[in-house]
Amino acid sequence: MGLLLLGIFLSSTAYGQNADRSSAEEKAVSNPEEEKPDYSSLPKNPRKATILSAVLPGAGQVYNNKAWKVPLLYAGFMTDIYFIGYNNKRYQTFREALFAFDEGDNSQFPSLNRDGLVRNVDYWRQNRDFTILLLVAIYALNIIDANVDAHLSGFDISDELALKIEPKVETFAASNTQMGLTLKLKFK
């Protein structure tokens, strides 16, 4: 019975979405140039915040009045740039030692054979490449954070809304007690 009701609900929801989609598609076909999102009801413009953060990391956060995030962002950038340099330095050291070993000089790392040097070269190169990808991820998260913050700038966080997590204890029988958590959402 529950599956039948769920199926009916999902099919009616899908039908309603298709009707809305077809009317939106008709509008887009009739005048594709005017199909721009309206941000006038939001206190902050998400497009402006995104562009600011893309041009200068942290500028979108300042625009969104979240300047406290900027030192965290730049600390992430500086830490990652330090580790890129460190891993690249180690990679170059082992790479030069491998080239020297191939020419008969194993004085840099006498306890390592060729396989050990190759493993170290691969290890430090992978670490360097990973930290470069991490730098790109930090930059992308900076842009995403500014955009999402601007979108949520008009979100109502008044005291009339409340979300609480509370412990709950239920007794089904004299010897069967269950404990759990409840999630309560209140609208005043």
Image (spheres, rainbow, N blue to C red):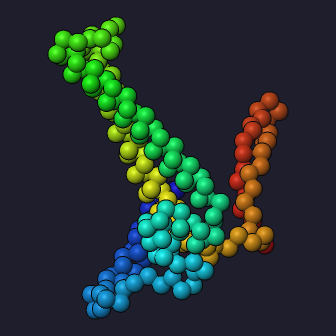
The residue at the point 41 percent across, 40 percent down is: 84
On the rendered structure, is 159 left or right of 13? Answer: right
Question: Relative to residue 166, is residue 48 drawn left or right?
Answer: left
User: In x, y percent, where is residue 28?
Assistant: 31, 86
* Residue 109 percent coordinates (x, y): 33, 13
Q: Residue furthest right?
A: 174
Displayed quadrant of residue 36: bottom left
Q: Image quadrant of residue 150?
A: bottom right
Toward the left, the furthest residue is: 103
Compared with 170, 110 (above or below) is: above
* Residue 40: percent from left, percent from top: 54, 86
Report whether 79 appears left or right of 162.
left
Q: Is residue 162 visible?
A: yes
Q: Position of residue 103 (x, y in %)?
A: 16, 16
Q: Residue at x 51, y 82 (%)?
A: 39
Q: Which one is in front, 3 or 115?
A: 115
Quarter of the image with the C terminus is: bottom right
What is the tally of numbered marks visible in this picture?
0
Residue pictured at 52% horizontal, 78% vertical: 45
Between 56 and 150, the one lying in front of the other is 56
Q: Residue at x 75, y 56 (%)?
A: 164
Say above or below: 12 vs 168: below
